[in-house]
Amino acid sequence: MEVTFKDVSLSYDGSREILHHLNFTIPEGTLVSILGPSGCGKSTTLMMISGLLAPTSGKIFFGDKDVTKQDALARKVGMVFQNYALYPHLTVLENIMFPLKMAKVKKPERKKRALELAKLVHVEDQINKKPGALSGGQQQRVAIARALAKEPSLLLLDEPLSNLDARLRIEMREEIRRIQQETGVTTIFVTHDQDEALHISDHIMVLNNGDMQQFSSAETLYDNPSNLFVAKFIGEPVINTLEISDFQGELDQHVPADILKNAVSVGIRPEALQDHDSGSDTIATIETTVKEFEKYGREKNAQLDFHGKKLLTTEIENNLEKDQKLTLYLQKSGFYLFDQDGKRIFGGDQDAK
Amino acid sequence: MLNEKPTLKSTGKAFLYLLPMLLITVTFNIYPIIKSFMMSFYTKYDFFTDKVSKIGWDNFTYIFNDPDFHIAVKNTLIFVVGVVPLTVIISLVIALLLNRIKWLSGLFRTVYFLPFVTSTVAIAQVWHWIYNSDYGLLNYFLSLFGVNPISWLESPKYAMLSLIIMSIWKNLGFNIVLFLVGLNNINERYYQAAKIDGANSWHQFTNVTLPLLSPITFLVTINGVIGSFKAFDQIFALFNGNPGPSKSALTIVYYLYQKFYTEWKYGIAAASGVVLFFMILLVTVIQLSYSKKHVHY
Amino acid sequence: MKVKIAMVLRYVILILGGIIMLMPFLWMLSTSLKTQPETVKIPPIWIPKQLQFSNYIDAFKAAPFAQYFLNSVFVTTVTTVGQLFTSILAAFAFSRLNFYGKNIIFVIFLGTMMVPVEMLIIPNFVTLSKLHLVNTYAALIVPWLASFFTVFTLRQNFQSVPDQLYYAAKIDGASDWHYLWHVLVPISKSTITAVTVLQVIGSWNSFMWPLIVTNSENLRTLPVGLQAFTGDAGTNYAQLMAASTFVILPMVILYLFLQKYIIAGISKTGLKG
């Protein structure tokens, strides 16, 4: 099911606005992540899609149908909660059957479908246990099976992996991807972990302070961040950020003067600072001093001083000495300029969104 | 939806859920509260037609000048003072002891709590028999120590004491359970900290246990006071439908019962109920303000 | 050594106290099985030569205890079930639903909990006579079909259930009604059991109200019937103790089986007494 938000805002108590004028369309059959720091409004957005929360203004569409006034009961979505929210008094099988029972599906039929789902999520050997007797990962699987039980048009997952340990998290995110592809259900996944989002989603929506920052594929987010927030939020290690005033003419020849005039912040990905000239992609050179050099395995990192500001680079070929002078070649592919509102005005693909 | 403001529709739905409860409580709790205040001012009242022909302060004047009511208030206060402090102290001691033992502590708790679940009327018959001056168990025990037989229930001197003993016995278990809950809630770390600070067990008790237990002590006290103010069943049963020899166990609620049920003086009975209400209110307010200063939540 | 003495001392005090607590029960049982001459023997005997179970049969014949028992069972059952039903619905509304006047109503009801029930007996009696219900089963039952104390206890418990379960139930297609009965009530089983047991005990033992609103013998509950019987039994203590045992025993059995819930209930609410 395609989900469309048209100018949706939400405020509590009529004053504190949580979400501001959201506009987006989630295409049918895709897996979309809503990514952002805690408190950015991502779970709230999910709750509005589910019908648990009503927007203060704006409209929500499922396909062509306006569902703004419908509650969760009528919208028929499946949802997995952060703490799984399994019914503690019911067995695994009864938990999966619960939505079918509410939909008045006949008992033999509901048992059959619940067993199929238990198989799909690989908990068929646990069906008679109570949730309390399951591990976190197993509870997660049951919660997904329950959410899928009524064949929802939408599957919503609210930080589903945050209560799992690191290894299980990776396993479960692959599972979610597999289940989504097997069932083809449009899936919306809320997370604060960029790694999770980048690995499993077709599209990522970045939210901050209740505003949508960017909604695109993982690659586009990285290569063409639409603003400084996205550039800083996506990428590990974090992008180097400088003020335009930190530069003393190094950029003058290379960036059109009318753009440079409006630029306030500069973002340089650590891999876009090379100690060797790779040719055509280089747009400028800067002179730096080595402050720290670390080498583990194949990785070489250097902390550099550039006009009193720190820079990090991961693209070092030669071993460096502390306090050594070093010329760096700035690569165009990871170099961005942002205006005073944080909007990207130079670098990347200007047409990409 | 969750963030929706109440609407007429949601209010209507909620009231369907509330309706059965409201129907009963409004008829049998809310309305009668108002009605008993009003009735206390009915000085000429025909119960059969529910007609009030005169209202005024006469009922209150009457009870304030009625020697029986004075006795009732005095006895109620004696009963409260006799029951509450002893109950609090004994149940605290038993709870502390129970808290310090492992073996058989469950059995002891069961035994001490048992009186609470029993019918006051039935157990009062048993106590009536224990208090029997000729063949009763109590006088027999006392005779072993050379005490002459006491007319527990027939002598005005001892009637109130008999009542107090039985009441303490019956309510001990309930308060022990509350104290045990309170003791369990005290974090072991406070004791460890106190030990490290060199406190002996008495200091631990006065500096850790008692202050941290004060909310429960407060609860037990206020429960006890309110419950004792309303004493009736045990008196009726222990003295076989009398307020004790020469009214020695006449309490406010018993007075209310007599005026209402045997003398059909509704207005006077209602007035005594109102007095009872204000006495309980007063005690509660005093205790609350005291607790603000001395109870450590 | 000092520690050991303290431990022994604790047990000595607790055992002595325990004996005092149990004494009336043992004395009751013992007397109920004695012959008339044995009851007045000095020094008292604890174990009768021959157990006189006939005392129980005689007491049963002397007064309609079977009828009293059935009345008590009936009144207690209907009161408890009815009160539970009205309280669960109301507690749900207070804990989950949005409606106008919610806080005001709640505060008013909290206030009414301060008022002694004894004060309400007179107007309630008047109301029931106007409805021609005095001296009927309805008079014994109807006024107790709702208790704000139970509503309050259940509401506290309902509010402690995580919100996410409510959301999950909504997503799963459960209406409020279904959520209440399929999720909330089963989850709150232990609290509901606790208030139920406390209510059964209270209802079974209640005395003043049944005494006032009934006067025909066939409507008496056990405590009222027993009180009436004391007049008839006179000094036949064996029979009186047999009858008392009969009144006390059901609640003692209930207590021994459901002890865990009663204790938990008191720990949670702490107010009923």
Image: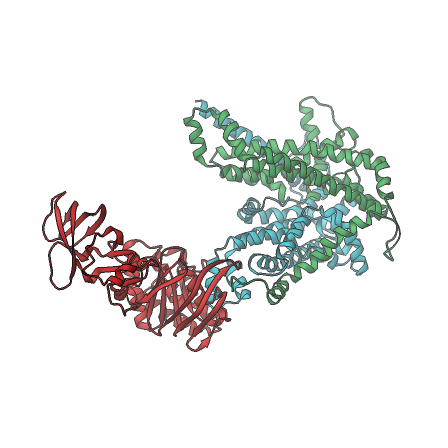
Q: Which chain is cyan?
A: C
* Above or below, C242 relative to C99: above
Is residue A114 among what the camera can see?
A: yes
Give x and y (percent) for residue C135: 78, 57
- Colour in which chain A is drawn: red
Viewer-nearest residue: B138 or B32: B32
* Above or below, C92 relative to B106: below
Q: Image quadrant for the C terminus of chain B?
A: top right
Viewer-nearest residue: A286 or C197: A286
* Above or below, B147 relative to A308: above
Is residue A168 among what the camera can see?
A: no
Give x and y (percent) for residue B267: 84, 47
Judged from this view, the residue extending furthest toward the left is: A318
Q: Which picture quadrant has residue C80? A: bottom right
Q: Which picture quadrant has residue A351? A: bottom left
Give x and y (percent) for residue C102: 62, 57
Q: Is residue B100 left or right of residue A225?
A: right
How many discs appear?
0
Q: Which picture quadrant has residue B278? A: top right
- Colour in which chain B is drawn: green
Q: Is residue B266 left or right of residue B192?
A: right
* Above or below, B159 relative to C208: above
Instruction: Name the image colouring.
Output: by chain
Give x and y (percent) for residue A83: 40, 57
